[in-house]
Image (cartoon, rainbow, N blue to C red):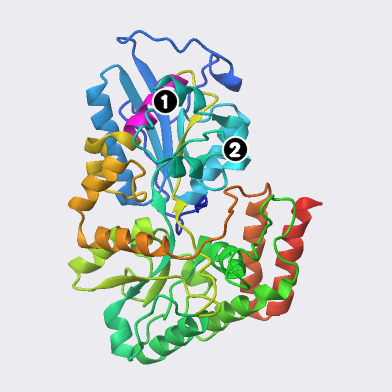
Amino acid sequence: MVLGLTACGTPETSTSAVGSSETTEVVEDTAAVGGEEVDETVDSDEQITLRMAWWGSQTRHDLTVEVIEMYEAENPNINIEYEFYDFDSYFTKLKTLVASDQVWDIFQLGGNFPEYIDKIQYMNEYIDSGIVDTSNIPESYLKITQDMDGNQIGLSNGLNTYGIAYDVDMFKEAGVPLPTDNWTWEDFENAALTISKKTGHFGSSGFTSSEFISGCSTYIAQQGKVGEYGFFNIDLTGMGFSDPQMLTPYIEMRAKLINEGASPDAGAEMEITNIENDFLVTGEAAMTWVAVNQFPTIYDICAEEGRTLALATIPRVKADGPAGTVVQSSQMLCVSKDSKYKEEAAKFISWFQNSTECNNVLKGERGIPINNDVRETLEADATDGQKIMYDYVTLVGTFEMPEKINVLSPAGQDEVVDNYRNYIQQVVSGEITAEEAAEKTYSDAEKLFN
């Protein structure tokens, strides 16, 4: 079973760039505004400009630019103007483009795609016509980026899931046992506190934009029997649990770690601008929450410094209880309804997912490729960090999963997430209790359905 991954890690560097045209402003094309139908039949010699954007780390930026230039070389009539951002800046920009009907021709989305569904051109017709090749993509991997009606919203950039990256030597220095495949949040808390006291470093880095994923969607799903609870119900018509206090232990744990110096406070968290300068990577923390497609990058950085990183599963509420984690889609590339050249945008996305040459450059940085041939090729030549990523995703795939998982997020969830993160900081400062934070979070979420 699979689930849409919204943020895919901490916010990244707030950098933007534009491609070979040297143009930073989006120029309005009246033929594309408002998603109007246009003639997409183009002469092979016609010069076409596509606009593309994504968020991610500097590594992602560099690799994506490299393959864009590769595509332009193979298709001399195509010029791709590109922009890249950190996570928050990306969606700030996207909202302005939505309002002016100028969304990029090709754009990256995660599990929050319902908020932008009116700007997404479904790919069904391009798949049916063969413009987008899905012949070597398993049906189960296509479904992870479909809506409830089977419309193909985009193609997944890769299979992904969450884990805890940790510094093996820092655990050993503090005399803390290494995590097991079914360790608990209590084990995590004890490890973080012990490591902090014995080494002077943070036991755990901050969870920043992933706090909601860890403390709400995952933590709630780990309680009861497999599939018994979810933060929202499967139909997105209401809440998936009835007792707000199910959230309280996690909130108490996070506040305790911050107050005891075992995890960074809000001010220190602001120093984390991308996964590459996370406190784990800089040697100032023993653990961090990570979308595992990010792991090979930070593994290589630390290996160059003589440090060894490993991946642990997400801690559980009970050792014999549900894992609460699933294999997911990292993000997907979508075609914009505002695009003048939707067919050409779809062709690029097909190449991006299916080209072995392209993916030999990308190296699964966005997640494990969904194309069978591409994945087999990359696995045969994987680095140590990538092998750990592949093995970890395989492990998570063996965990018992619910029969049904909804890939959608309800409209308005972003505000609930922002409030929840603020409530945790208010617990840290003593303004409210963990119980009150749980009640407020539940109330905020419940209002989405009123």
Residue marked by disc 2: 116
Image quadrant assignment for residue 327: bottom left
With 306 as the anchor, is 245 left or right in this view? right
Q: Residues within 10 Å of mark 2 (few under 14, many from 20)?
A: some
The span picked out in magenta is 342-352
Label whose residue precedes the other's in the sequence (1 or 2): 2
The kind of residue tagged 1 is: Ala
Query: Could you tell whether 36 is left or right of 297 in the image?
Result: right
Q: Main secondary structure of the magenta part?
A: helix
Q: Quadrant of residue 396?
A: bottom left
Dot 2 amino acid type: Tyr
Closer to the camera in the image, 321 or 314: 321
Q: Position of residue 75 (x, y in %)?
A: 27, 21
Residue tagged by mark 1? 345
Q: Does residue 366 belong to the magenta stretch? A: no
Q: Secondary structure at mark 1?
A: helix
The quarter holding residue 427 reads: bottom right
In this view of the protein, can residue 108 be seen by the observer?
yes
Helix or strand or loop: what does disc 2 sit on? helix
Asked whether residue 432 is in view, the answer is no
Residue drawn at x 26%, y 81% is 169
Q: Is residue 121 above or below residue 425?
A: above
